[in-house]
Image (cartoon, rainbow, N blue to C red):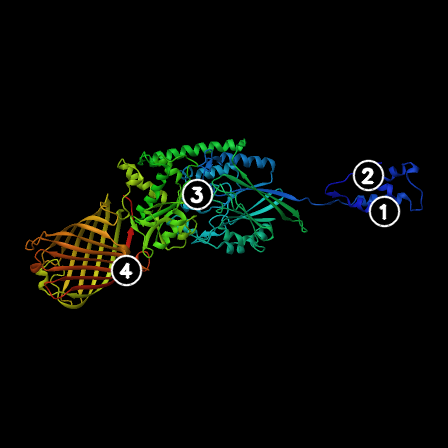
């Protein structure tokens, strides 16, 4: 007798009907035979094997079964599987990094060769594999920066990536460089919610479709909506971002209809609160492969995020230390389609060698990238200053916030330690090259105005302890009191702070206190500021240590301003100018008058050690309303101010040199006054500075005027209150011959209300008073000021 063998997934309809018919007629032994048995074979069996009973002839039943067995087979579909391998936030790193670098024996993990070997091994085991990346692949790293990410694209092409999403740091080299990398990529570059601002065309493919193992997969890419905070400043306005959920609502129905995929996968670079809406029942997204949320390779806290109906968001760490693996199972649907029924996520750490031909091939790419980077360093930065021999790794890192503060002309600067690769890649920092490699970020510098109370909170969260989470310049705790540049922090006083742009965006861990603070962004990255500073030191042949930085207020910069104003003036009597030329409104009528004022001023300030110099060139014209008196003047002013911390951070000796030259009407003599002063300066809270000293005055062209030596008291005040900028400079000058020359009071006060970054409404009050004369010389000026202030490092 031929026994029926069970078939997996396949059974003929004829056999099923034959089984049912046999049961009806009681011919049980027949069903033990093979479906292929013929009637003649059954009739040839011994009579003892078939009991006798009344029934239709066996040949009739056998004939019906044979006819039924000739019907087509029904195929029961098997489940299908797909493996997705995914990476994110590799930051252009080619080599392994050191996890827990401060342990005696740190773990070595990651690296391009190890990742490629694992990818090749997984593909050999499971041909139905898709390889994806959620972005931050082009950098920032020193090896990637040498070619603006081109070497990374070559590596990804060799590894066989299917699709990747450009994320925030992939925009760091500029849009033109990114588009070059998109064209060079053999993998699909998907970016669903970013488009060109002018043409409204997508920046890259809005989606891509792949088929693996009979499963159709559609892949889209979603980037954080704050793209303007990522792109190079010169590219702002060239692209625009559609909110991620809005892009999903528009494109997913189109993809479902046009491509009929079995699954839609979203590559994302979003915060967790932006990812969660994609994991809802009606989002249209089946699986999220994300980045951005796994920046710490030692503690992958958000590897898997579960949403409604079992939807998942998967992340694969950072710094190239792991490859994510997701095994997807699809069950057949009623319409012949396949539906995702199971997700089995895994995290494959790259902490051991896995020999594979693909890994060996990628090791050649790594060697080439290292050579290109070394050549790039030698060509571009070979003359940079060296670090001082006594500089440790931590001291070297602390140089960067000092440079940020110097570049931004801020009172303090803070930089998270996470902006360094620590000793994970290049070992201890002993040279400017190793510092450049350890600090590869392309983020711009932001300058914010914050209250002292905010700084106290910031210090407690990020700067306290033996190994703080951030590095600071200009901010330190003396006992229990927080100080800025040696002065106690006042809770209600406003201070300027330089930080990376992500700190203002709320994306820097431990600097959440600064999230959302209004700030301006400098047109330079932290890396560029570092290179500019060390290049200048290199030209001077210096070795740089932390003690070599000047005070923040000595930072070189250029400034120009254009001011339109209307004057309301109160003048002195005519004779005032002839007897005391320091009252420079010589020859003007007394009384009230309206005037139009145009003042253009071009200035520069530069510093050497503790010497602060200012040179101003200005043109001033003044037209009175009565038309009878007009003053036109060109003016050159030079001011040099020296302050040193010989006594304390609050009390400093000072020395000033001021040269004023003014060319008034042809009938009047040229005016050239020199003033040399010295004394002590004391800094008080709330922005007040009090000076007391001796001043010598000399008139160069008007020889009739005697030299004057006298005592000066001066009050300087500068503070920002809400959005108003307040300042005053009040000086009292008394000579030894007060009876013959009088006591002179000179004041200039300014209130400014910013309208935007370059324009402000201003009110200026000038007052001159000599005790020999009964009247004040006063001027009220209300105007519109355009200021263009661009700091540069010489």
Q: Position of residue 444 (x, y in %)?
A: 37, 47
* Image position of 15 (left or right of 291): right
Task: Name the residue carrying label 2.
Answer: 34
Task: Name the residue carrying label 4.
Answer: 752
Q: Position of residue 335 (x, y in %)?
A: 67, 51
Spatial distance from mark 1 to mark 4, Cα to Cα?
A: 102 Å
Disc with the residue nearer the chain's start (1 vs 4): 1
Residues at marks 1 and 4 touching, judged by CB atoms closer than 8 Å: no
Spatial distance from mark 2 to mark 3, Cα to Cα?
A: 66 Å
Task: Name the residue carrying label 3.
Answer: 180
Q: Which mark is residue 23?
A: 1
Spatial distance from mark 2 to mark 1, Cα to Cα?
A: 16 Å
| Helix, strand or loop at mark 1 | helix
Which one is in front, 334 or 112?
Answer: 112
Number of residues whose C-alpha sits closer than 10 Å to that of mark 4, classed few (under 14), some (14–19) or many (20 or more): many
Number of residues whose C-alpha sits closer than 10 Å to that of mark 3, classed few (under 14), some (14–19) or many (20 or more): few
């Amino acid at each position: 007798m031929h026994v029926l063998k069970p078939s997996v997934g396949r059974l003929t309809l004829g056999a099923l009907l034959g089984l049912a018919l046999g049961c009806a007629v009681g011919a049980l032994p027949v069903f033990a035979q093979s479906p292929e048995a013929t009637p003649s074979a059954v009739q040839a069996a011994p009579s003892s094997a078939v009991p006798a009973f009344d029934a239709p002839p066996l040949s009739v039943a056998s004939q019906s079964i044979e006819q039924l067995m000739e019907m087509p087979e029904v195929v029961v579909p098997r489940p299908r599987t797909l493996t997705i391998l995914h990476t994110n936030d590799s930051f252009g790193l080619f080599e392994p990094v050191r996890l827990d670098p401060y342990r005696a024996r740190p773990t070595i993990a990651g690296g391009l060769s190890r990742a490629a070997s694992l990818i090749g091994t997984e593909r050999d085991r499971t041909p139905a594999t898709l390889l994806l990346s959620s972005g931050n692949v082009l950098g920032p790293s020193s090896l990637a920066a040498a070619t603006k990410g081109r070497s990374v694209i070559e590596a990804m092409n060799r590894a066989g990536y299917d699709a990747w999403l450009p994320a925030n740091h992939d925009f760091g080299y500029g849009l033109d460089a990114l588009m070059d990398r998109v064209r060079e990529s053999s993998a699909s570059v998907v970016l669903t919610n970013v488009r060109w601002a002018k043409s409204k065309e997508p920046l890259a493919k809005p989606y891509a479709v792949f088929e693996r193992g009979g499963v159709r997969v559609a892949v889209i890419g979603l980037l954080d909506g704050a793209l303007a905070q990522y792109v190079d400043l010169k590219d702002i306005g060239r692209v625009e971002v559609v909110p991620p959920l809005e892009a999903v609502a528009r494109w997913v129905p189109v993809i479902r209809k046009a491509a009929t995929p079995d699954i839609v996968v979203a590559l994302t670079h979003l915060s967790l609160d932006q990812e969660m809406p994609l994991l809802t029942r009606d989002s249209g997204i089946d699986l999220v492969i994300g980045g951005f949320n796994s920046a710490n390779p030692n503690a992958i806290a958000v590897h898997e995020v579960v949403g409604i109906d079992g939807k998942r968001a998967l992340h694969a760490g950072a710094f190239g230390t792991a490859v994510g693996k997701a095994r997807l199972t699809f069950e057949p649907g009623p319409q012949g389609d396949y539906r995702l029924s199971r997700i089995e996520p895994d995290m494959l750490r790259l902490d051991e060698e896995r020999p594979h031909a693909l890994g060996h091939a990628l090791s050649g790419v790594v060697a080439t990238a290292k050579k290109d980077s070394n050549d790039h360093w030698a060509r571009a930065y070979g003359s940079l200053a060296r670090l001082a021999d006594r500089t440790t790794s931590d001291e070297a890192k602390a140089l960067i916030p000092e440079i940020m503060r110097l570049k931004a002309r801020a009172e303090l600067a803070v930089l998270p330690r996470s902006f360094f690769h620590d000793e994970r890649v290049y070992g201890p920092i002993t040279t400017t090259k190793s510092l450049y490699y350890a600090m590869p970020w392309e983020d711009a510098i932001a300058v914010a105005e914050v209250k002292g109370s905010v700084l106290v909170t910031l210090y407690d969260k990020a700067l306290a302890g033996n190994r703080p989470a951030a590095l600071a310049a200009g901010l330190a705790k003396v006992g229990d009191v927080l100080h800025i540049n040696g002065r106690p922090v006042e809770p209600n006083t406003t201070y300027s702070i330089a930080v990376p742009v992500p700190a203002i965006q709320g994306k820097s861990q431990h600097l959440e206190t600064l999230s959302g603070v209004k700030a301006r962004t400098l047109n330079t990255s932290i890396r560029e500021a570092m290179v500019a500073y060390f290049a200048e030191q290199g030209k001077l042949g210096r070795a740089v240590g932390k003690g070599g930085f000047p005070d923040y207020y000595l930072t070189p910069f250029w400034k120009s301003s254009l001011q339109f104003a209307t004057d309301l003036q109160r003048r002195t009597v005519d004779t005032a100018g002839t007897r005391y030329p320091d009252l420079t409104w010589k020859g003007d009528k007394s009384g009230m008058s309206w005037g139009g004022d145009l003042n253009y001023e071009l200035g520069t300030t530069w510093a050497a050690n503790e010497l602060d110099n200012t040179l101003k060139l200005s043109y001033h014209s003044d037209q009175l309303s009565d038309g009878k008196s007009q003053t036109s003047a060109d003016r050159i002013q030079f001011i040099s101010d020296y302050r040193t911390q010989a006594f304390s951070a609050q009390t400093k000796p000072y020395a000033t040199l001021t040269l004023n030259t003014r060319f008034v009407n042809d009938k009047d003599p040229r005016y050239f006054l020199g003033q040399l002063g010295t004394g002590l300066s004391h800094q008080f809270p709330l922005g007040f500075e009090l000076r007391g000293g001796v001043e010598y005055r000399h008139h160069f062209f008007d020889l009739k005027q005697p030299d004057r030596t006298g005592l000066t008291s001066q009050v300087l005040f500068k503070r920002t209150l809400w959005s108003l900028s307040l300042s005053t400079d009040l000086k009292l000058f008394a000579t030894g011959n007060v009876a013959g020359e009088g006591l002179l009071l000179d004041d200039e006060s300014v209130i400014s209300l910013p309208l935007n970054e370059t324009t402000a409404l201003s009110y200026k009050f000038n007052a001159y008073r000599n005790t020999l004369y009964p009247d004040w010389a006063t001027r009220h000026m209300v105007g519109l000021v355009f200021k263009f202030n661009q700091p540069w490092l010489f």
